[in-house]
Amino acid sequence: MNSPYLLKNIDKLVERIVRAIKNNEKIVIYADVDFDGISSTVILYKILLRFTDNVQIKYVERSQGHGSKFIIDQIEDDTDLYIAVDSSSNDVEPLKMLVDKGIDCLVIDHHSVDVENPYCILVNPQQTGCEYPNKNASGGLLVYKVCQVIDDYMDTRYSLELSDLPGFALMADVMCMKEMENRYYAKVSLKGLRHEGLKLLFEAMNSDLKNLTSTDFLYGASPAVTAATRADNIKLAIDFLMCDKATPETKGYVKELIKLNENRKVVQAEALERHKDSIKDEDKVVIVYDSTIGKGLNGLVAQELSKKFNRPAIVLGDGDDENTYAGSFRGLEGFSMLDLLNQCNGVEHTGGHPGAGGLSLKKDNIQVLKDDLNYHLSSFVPDDTLYYDLEFSVDEIDERMINYLTEFYRYSGNNFKPGAFLIKDLFISDKKLMGKTNNTVKIDCGTLQLMKFKTDEEYYDKVPVFTEIEAVGSLNMNVWTQYRPKKKVIKTCQLFIEEYQEVI
C-alpha cells in the first residue's frame, strides 16, 4: 500500500472536509454513474455520515451525461461544500459557476488532467507534481485514501469497515492488475468481503463466496450493478451498495439487479446480431449507428463488436441535438484509442480511458472520422490469432490442477489476463443447447465439460459429436449441491472455450 499523504493536495482537501464537519456545513457529493463512481460515492458518504447528517448525494442518469456541468442546476444555493468523485478534473466552467455562488469545490478523480482548474482542490495522481506512485488508481481507491486521512484527522478508524470496496472499484474500472497496490486491494475485496448486499448478489449468481475470483466479479456482480445505471436507475445501484445488512429490502434489490442484467444481455445480443453482417473488411475501425441501443449500452455493444472483429469499435446514437452523434468507443491493447480520436478532425469531444470512453461528432463529419481513422491505422491488420499460455492433455486436468491455476489467476484484469490454455486429446461424446435464449452450448468430453457462452443455435449445430478435438479456453471448477435422491456435493471440471478445432 502507498501512503495517502503522497497524493498532492490531500491535506488541503481533508482539512476543508473536516472544517465542514465541525461547522455543520452542508455537503453535497456528486456521483458518477459507473461502478467506480457509485462505490466512490458510497465510501465517502458512509464515512461522512459518521460525523455529520448534513450531507447528501446528487446524481444525474447515465443518459444525461458525465461531469459536473450536468448537475450544477441541482446544487442549492445554501450548499457550502461540493465534492465530485470519479469525475470533473477538467470541469473548469461548471466549478467556476459554483465558486461564484460561494460554494467551495473539491474533486477526487483519476482521469487525465488536461487543463489547470483553479476552482477546486484537486486530488488526482495524474496531475503535475503528484508523487503518488500508483498512476493506475481508480476513483474508489482514491476516495478510500482520502477517508484514511479523514480517520487520521478525526482520530477514528471507520475506513477499515469499508476496506472491501476499493478493490471492486479498481476491478470494475479495468485498472492495471500488474500494479501491486491494486492487486492488494483486489485481494482484500475477494478474500475479505464484508458487504452483505454483494454477498447476496454473488450467491444469487452461483459464485462460491469462499473462493471468489476477479472473473466472478467482472462477469457477474459488476455488470449486474451497472445494469441499473445503464437502465437510468442509478438510485437502485446506490441504494444497493448502501446496504449494510442482508434484509428483505436488500434481497429485493438483488432480484431487481439480476432482472435488469438479464435484459441487458438480451439487448446487447440483439444489437450484435443486427450489425455483425454490416462491417466492411477495409474499415480499420468498426463504426455503427443505432439509436435503439441507448447510451447506457453503446459501450458494451462496441466491446462485443471489437472482440468479434478484432479491431477498435465505435457505436453511435443520437446526440444532444439533431445534428450530432454521440456514443462510445472500445479500443485494443497496445495503443490509446482515446489519443487516436483526439487526433481526428471530425471529433467534437472525447473522454474516458485510453481503451474505453465516449465521443461526439457532427453527423456531417462521420465520413471524415472514418477516413481519418483509416489513415492513422493504415498499417494496422486485424489479428484473429487465438493466443494461449500453456497446453495440457485432458488427462492432466483434475481438481487439484484447476485450483492451482485459479489461485494463480485469482486477481486478474487489465494487463494480467486470466490464463488461457490449449487442451488436447478431447473426444466429444455429447452436446447440449442451454439457457433461456439458447445462447449457451455444453459439450461433454468425458472428465471435462466444455462450455461456450454468448453463442447461438448455429454454433451448436456445427459442433461435431464422436469427434476428437482440441480447444482453447479458461479452466474452472463447477461446484453445486445435489439434494435428491441424496444430498451430495457435485464437482465438475470445466473449460470455458474461446474456440475449438477438429483433429485431423
Image (spheres, rainbow, N blue to C red):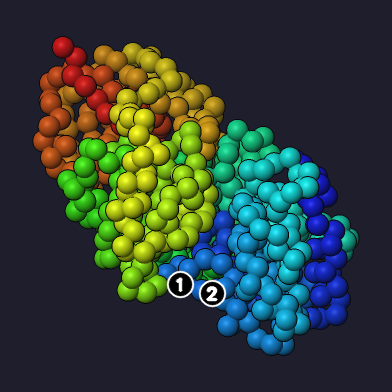
| Label located before the other in sequence (1 or 2) | 1
| Res. 215 mark | none
Residue 292, by quadrant, is bottom left
The x, y position of residue 307, in whole percent, is: 33, 40
- Tell me if 217 is positioned left or right of 373 in this view: right
Q: Is residue 331 visible?
A: yes
| Res. 70 mark | 2
- Tell me if 183 is positioned left or right of 290 in this view: right
Query: Which residue is tagged 1?
Result: 64
The x, y position of residue 228, in whole percent, is: 43, 65
Amino acid type of the residue tagged 2 in the rendering: Phe
Seen in the picture, residue 476 relative to 135 is either above or below; the reply is above
Residue at the spot 78% in from the left edge and 47% down from the top edge: 129
- Tell me if 171 is positioned left or right of 19 in this view: left
In whole angstroms, how far apart are the C-alphas of marks 1 and 2?
Answer: 7 Å
Question: Which one is in front, 444 or 364?
Answer: 364
Q: In which quarter of the image is the N terminus?
A: top right
Residue at the spot 76% in from the left edge and 75% down from the top edge: 104
Q: For numbered disc 2, what is the local secondary structure?
A: helix
Q: Do the residues labelled 1 and 2 touch (CB within 8 Å)?
A: yes
Q: How crowded is mark 1: few (under 14 residues within 10 Å), some or many (20 or more)?
A: few
Residue at the spot 24% in from the left edge and 25% down from the top edge: 500
Seen in the picture, residue 312 relative to 196 is either above or below; the reply is above
The x, y position of residue 380, in whole percent, is: 36, 31
Amino acid type of the residue tagged 1 in the rendering: Gln
Question: Which one is in front, 365 or 139?
Answer: 365
